[in-house]
Image (cartoon, rainbow, N blue to C red):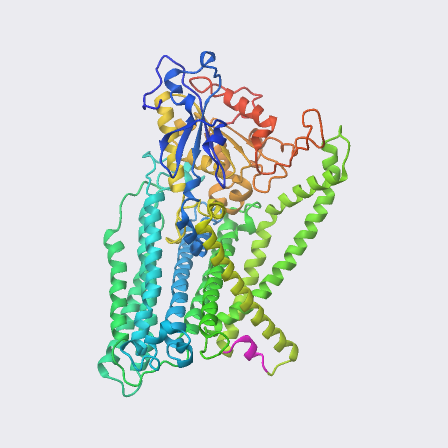
C-alpha cells in the first residue's frame, strides 16, 4: 500500500515489509531507519509509523535491482511518546502504588479449568486496589482535616504562626464564622475532594488519549486455542467497560471517605447526652447512608471483571454517572451537617486517624494473605518451576503496593505535621500508627541490606567463576586480566535479574511481618514507639527511640526525593524520559485492578500494530517480519496474538534483547508462560531470538523440546573483540542490552529470516532451517 493508500498491482509479487518496534526509553525514526530523511506515513504525534523518504511509495513502484533495493521495505513504529511526553507525566508519580497493584492482577499463575478461582484472584486484587484509593484519600483527609483544620487551627500557638489559618482559628479570628470545628472540617474537605477529582480527571483523560483505540474486529478463535493465552482474545486490549465501572466506584469511594471524615466527629458529639434530637437523628441517618453507599461501591468492584472473549462496546452509563453523583450529594450533606451550629463544640486531640489507618492496614494484610492462598492453589494446578516465587509473585507485589501507599501516606502526614508545628509540640501530630509504620522502615532496610550483601557475595563469586570461561571464548588474543574481570563482572551483574524474585519475596515478607507488628504495637499501646518503650530495658528504649527518629528521617527523605523527582520531571525532558522507562515496564498491562493507575500504552500500541499488519498484508498479499527490541518484542508478540490465524502465518518474528521469558514469562506465567510462547512459535511463520550473557534484561525464550534451538540462537559474543584487532583497532565496548545491530550475527539472522519472506505465498520450510516451526 502506497502513501495514497493504493494497493500493489496484482501482477507484481507482494512486497516484503520489516516493521521495526523499539524498546524502553524510545528512540527516533531516523536512528531506527538509519536515514536522516524520514516521513510519517500514518499515525499522530503520540504514536506513528515512519518510512524512509525513498520508500514511501515502495509498494506501487515495486522493488528490485532497478531501484537499488533487493530486501524488504523497513518501517519504524515509534511509540515512545505514549510513556514520555509532556510535563503532566510528572503527576503520574502519585499513581505509583496503583500501578504496582495493577501489576499484581496479571501475575497470577497458570491455571486451566479453574475459572472461579481465577475470578476470585482478580476480585481480591481489585479489593486491594480499592483500599489503596481509600488510603490515599484518607491521607489527604489526615493532612487537611486533622492536622490543619482540626489540630493547628484549633490551637492558638500553631494558628498564630501560620497566618493563612488565622480565619479558621477561634482565638485569632475572634470566633469568626469559619472558626467553628465543623465548618473548618467542611472547608478543609475541599482539598481531598480536589484530589479525588484530579484522579478521576487523569483517569478519564488518559483513557480517551491512550486506551480508546478499538482493536480490529475479528472472530474469536476456538476456546481450546484461547486457553494458551488471553492476549489473543478479541477484547483483551479494550477494557473500556471495566475501567469506567472501576473509575466510578473508586471516585465514589474517595468521596465517601471524605464524607465520613467530615461527619463522624460531629456525629459523636451529637450522640452525647443532652444533644439536639434532630442532629442526633441526622447523625445516625448519615452514617447509615454512607455505609449503604459504601456497600454499593464494594458490590460494583466485586460484581464484574474483565470481558475479553469479545469486543465489549457497551457502557454502564447509569452506574458510571449515578454512583459518583450519589457520593457527591452525600458529601455535600455531610458538609452541611458538620457545619451546623453546635454550642460548646471544640476541637481537641486528634480525629479518629488511628482507627481508620489501622482498619485499612488490617484489611490490606488479610487481602494479601488470602491472595497468597489463592495463588498457591492455582500454582499447584499446573506447577511451573520458572514462575517467580512459585506463583506468589502477585501477592508479593500487592504487598509492596500497600507498603508504597503506606509510606506515601505516612511521609506526607509527618512532613506536614513537622511543617505546621516545627519543634513546638503544640499539636498532637499524626496518628500513632503512622509513626509505628515509619519506625519499622529501618528494620526493613536492614533486612534488605543483609540480603543485598548476600547477593553481592554471590555476584562476586559468580564473576570469579566466569574468568576462565571468558578467556576461553577469546583463545587467539593476548590476555588482559583487567579486561577479563570487567567482562566477567558485567555478566555476573546481568545475572542479578534472575535473582529479582528472591529480593521481592524477602522485601514483601519482611514488610508484612513488621507491618503486622507495627499495627499490634500501635493499637495496644496507643503511644509512639519511643513512649511505649519508656521504663523498659535501656537497650529496648534506646532501640525504639532510634528506630522512631531514623524512620521519621527516612520517610521524610523519601518524601523530599519524591517531590524533587516529580518537580524535575515536570521541567526536564531527560528526567521525564527516565520516568517513562519505568512506565514502559509497569504500564504494559491494561487497568484491570485500579482505574487510577497510569494508562496502558499497549491498548494503543497493540491495536496500532495489528491494524498496520492486517491492512498491509490484506492490501499487498505480502509477507512481513516484526523486528522487536526489548519491550518492542513484547508488543510484537502481543500484536501477533491479535492477528487472524491466516495473517499470523504471513508474519515472522525477530526479537533481540527480549524480556519475553526472562521477565514476562516468569512474572506473568498465565499470559507469557511456556505454553503461550510455544503456541506463538507454532502460529507465526518463523521466529528467531537473539540475546547476550551481558544483557540484564533480554534473555533466551527457553521453549521446551526441539522448539528451543529453533527460536533461540546461542548467546552472542559481547564484546565483539577482546582486545585490539585489525577489525577493531580501538577497544570494543561491552554492549549489554543495546546496539544488537552492531553484531554481524544480527545481520546474518536477519538476512536468513527475511529471505523467507520473498515468495508471494508462504513456502515450505527446509528441514535444516533454524527458524523452522513444527506447525
State yes or no: residue 16 in magenta: no
Position of 182 with respect to 501 (left or right) is left
The magenta span reads 527-534
Residue 766 found in image quarter: top right
Residue drawn at 61 percent across, 59 percent down: 448
- Across and down, in percent, residue 434 comes to 48, 70
Residue 231 found in image quarter: top left
- Across and down, in percent, residue 186 comes to 30, 71
Q: Residue furthest bottom?
A: 274
Tell me: residue 190, above or below residue 690.
Answer: below
Q: Quadrant of the N terminus?
A: top left
Residue 218 found in image quarter: top left
- Across and down, in percent, residue 136 comes to 41, 62
Residue nearest the viewer, comparing 506 with 673? 506
Tell me: residue 138, above or below residue 695.
Answer: below
- Across and down, in percent, residue 261 comes to 34, 71
Q: In this figure, what is the number of numbered marks?
A: 0
State yes or no: residue 531 in magenta: yes
Residue nearest the viewer, comparing 233 with 75? 75
Residue drawn at 52 percent across, 65 percent down: 556
Residue nearest the viewer, comparing 573 with 287? 573
Note whether residue 576 is visible.
Answer: yes
Residue nearest the viewer, comparing 530 with 685? 530
Tell me: residue 536, above or below residue 430.
Answer: below
Note whether residue 299 is visible.
Answer: no
Amino acid at each position: 500500500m502506497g502513501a495514497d493508500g493504493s494497493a500493489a498491482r496484482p501482477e507484481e509479487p507482494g512486497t516484503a515489509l520489516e516493521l521495526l518496534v523499539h524498546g524502553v526509553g524510545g528512540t527516533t525514526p531516523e536512528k531506527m531507519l538509519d536515514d536522516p530523511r524520514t516521513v510519517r506515513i500514518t499515525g499522530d504525534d503520540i504514536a506513528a509509523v515512519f518510512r524512509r523518504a525513498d520508500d514511501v511509495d515502495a509498494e506501487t513502484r515495486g522493488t528490485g535491482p532497478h531501484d537499488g533495493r533487493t530486501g524488504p521495505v523497513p518501517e519504524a513504529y515509534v511509540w515512545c511518546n505514549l510513556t514520555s511526553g509532556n510535563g503532566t507525566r510528572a503527576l503520574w508519580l502519585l499513581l505509583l502504588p496503583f500501578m504496582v497493584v495493577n501489576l499484581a492482577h496479571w501475575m497470577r499463575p497458570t491455571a486451566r479449568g479453574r475459572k472461579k478461582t481465577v475470578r476470585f484472584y482478580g476480585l481480591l486484587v481489585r479489593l486491594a486496589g480499592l483500599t489503596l484509593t481509600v488510603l490515599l484519600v484518607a491521607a489527604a483527609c489526615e493532612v487537611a482535616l486533622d492536622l490543619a483544620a482540626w489540630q493547628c487551627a484549633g490551637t492558638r500557638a500553631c494558628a498564630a504562626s501560620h497566618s493563612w489559618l488565622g480565619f479558621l482559628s477561634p482565638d485569632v479570628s475572634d470566633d469568626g464564622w469559619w472558626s467553628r470545628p465543623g465548618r473548618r472540617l467542611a472547608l478543609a474537605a475541599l482539598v481531598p475532594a480536589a484530589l479525588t477529582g484530579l484522579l478521576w480527571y487523569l483517569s478519564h483523560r488518559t483513557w480517551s488519549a491512550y486506551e480508546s483505540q478499538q482493536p480490529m474486529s475479528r472472530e474469536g478463535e476456538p476456546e481450546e486455542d484461547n486457553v494458551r493465552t488471553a492476549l489473543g482474545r478479541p477484547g483483551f486490549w479494550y477494557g473500556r467497560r471495566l475501567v469506567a465501572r472501576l473509575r466510578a466506584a473508586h471516585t465514589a469511594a474517595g468521596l465517601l471517605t471524605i464524607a465520613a471524615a467530615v461527619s463522624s466527629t460531629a456525629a459523636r458529639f451529637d450522640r452525647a447526652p443532652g444533644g439536639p434530637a434532630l442532629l442526633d437523628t441526622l447523625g445516625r441517618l448519615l452514617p447509615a447512608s454512607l455505609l449503604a453507599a459504601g456497600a454499593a461501591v464494594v458490590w460494583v468492584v466485586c460484581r464484574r471483571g474483565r470481558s475479553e472473549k469479545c469486543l465489549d462496546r457497551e457502557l454502564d452509563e447509569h452506574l458510571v454517572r449515578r454512583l459518583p453523583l450519589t457520593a457527591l450529594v452525600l458529601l455535600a450533606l455531610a458538609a452541611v451537617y458538620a457545619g451546623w451550629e453546635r454550642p460548646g463544640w471544640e476541637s481537641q486531640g486528634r480525629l479518629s486517624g488511628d482507627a481508620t489507618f489501622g482498619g485499612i492496614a488490617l484489611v490490606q494484610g488479610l487481602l494479601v494473605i488470602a491472595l497468597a492462598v489463592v495463588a498457591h492453589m492455582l500454582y499447584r494446578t499446573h506447577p511451573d518451576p520458572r514462575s517467580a516465587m512459585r506463583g506468589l509473585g502477585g501477592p508479593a507485589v500487592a504487598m509492596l503496593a500497600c507498603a508504597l501507599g503506606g509510606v506515601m501516606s505516612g511521609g506526607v502526614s509527618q512532613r506536614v505535621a513537622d511543617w505546621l508545628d516545627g519543634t513546638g509540640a503544640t499539636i498532637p501530630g499524626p496518628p500513632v500508627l503512622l509513626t509505628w509504620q515509619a519506625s519499622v522502615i529501618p528494620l526493613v532496610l536492614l533486612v534488605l541490606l543483609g540480603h543485598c550483601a548476600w547477593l553481592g557475595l554471590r555476584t562476586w563469586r559468580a564473576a570469579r567463576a566466569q574468568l576462565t570461561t571468558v578467556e576461553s571464548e577469546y583463545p587467539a588474543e593476548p590476555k588482559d586480566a583487567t579486561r577479563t574481570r570487567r567482562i566477567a563482572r558485567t555478566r555476573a551483574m546481568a545475572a542479578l535479574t534472575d535473582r529479582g524474585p528472591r529480593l521481592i519475596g524477602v522485601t514483601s515478607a519482611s514488610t508484612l511481618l513488621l507491618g503486622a507488628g507495627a499495627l499490634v504495637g500501635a493499637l495496644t499501646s496507643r503511644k509512639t514507639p519511643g513512649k511505649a518503650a519508656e521504663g523498659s530495658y535501656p537497650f529496648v528504649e534506646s532501640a525504639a527511640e532510634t528506630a522512631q527518629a531514623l524512620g521519621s528521617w527516612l520517610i521524610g527523605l523519601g518524601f523530599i526525593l519524591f517531590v524533587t523527582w516529580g518537580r524535575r520531571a515536570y521541567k526536564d525532558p531527560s528526567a521525564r524520559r527516565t520516568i517513562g522507562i519505568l512506565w514502559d515496564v509497569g504500564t504494559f498491562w491494561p487497568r484491570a485492578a485500579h482505574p487510577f493507575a497510569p494508562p496502558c500504552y499497549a491498548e494503543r500500541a497493540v491495536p496500532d500494530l495489528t491494524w498496520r499488519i492486517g491492512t498491509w498484508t490484506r492490501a499487498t498479499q505480502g509477507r512481513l517480519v516484526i523486528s522487536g527490541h526489548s519491550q518492542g518484542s513484547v508488543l510484537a508478540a502481543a500484536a501477533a496474538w491479535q492477528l487472524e490465524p491466516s495473517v499470523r502465518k504471513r508474519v515472522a518474528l525477530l526479537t533481540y534483547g527480549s524480556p519475553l521469558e526472562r521477565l514476562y514469562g516468569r512474572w506473568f506465567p498465565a499470559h507469557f508462560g511456556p505454553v503461550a510462547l510455544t503456541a506463538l512459535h507454532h502460529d507465526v511463520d518463523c521466529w528467531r531470538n537473539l540475546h547476550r550473557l551481558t544483557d540484564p534484561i533480554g534473555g533466551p525464550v527457553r521453549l521446551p523440546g526441539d522448539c528451543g534451538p529453533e527460536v533461540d540462537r546461542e548467546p552472542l559474543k559481547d564484546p565483539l573483540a577482546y582486545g585490539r584487532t585489525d577489525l577493531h583497532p580501538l577497544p570494543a565496548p561491552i554492549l549489554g542490552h543495546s546496539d544488537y545491530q552492531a553484531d554481524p550475527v544480527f545481520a546474518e539472522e536477519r538476512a536468513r529470516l527475511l529471505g523467507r519472506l520473498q515468495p508471494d505465498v508462504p513456502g515450505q520450510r527446509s528441514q535444516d532451517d533454524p527458524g523452522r516451526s513444527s506447525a
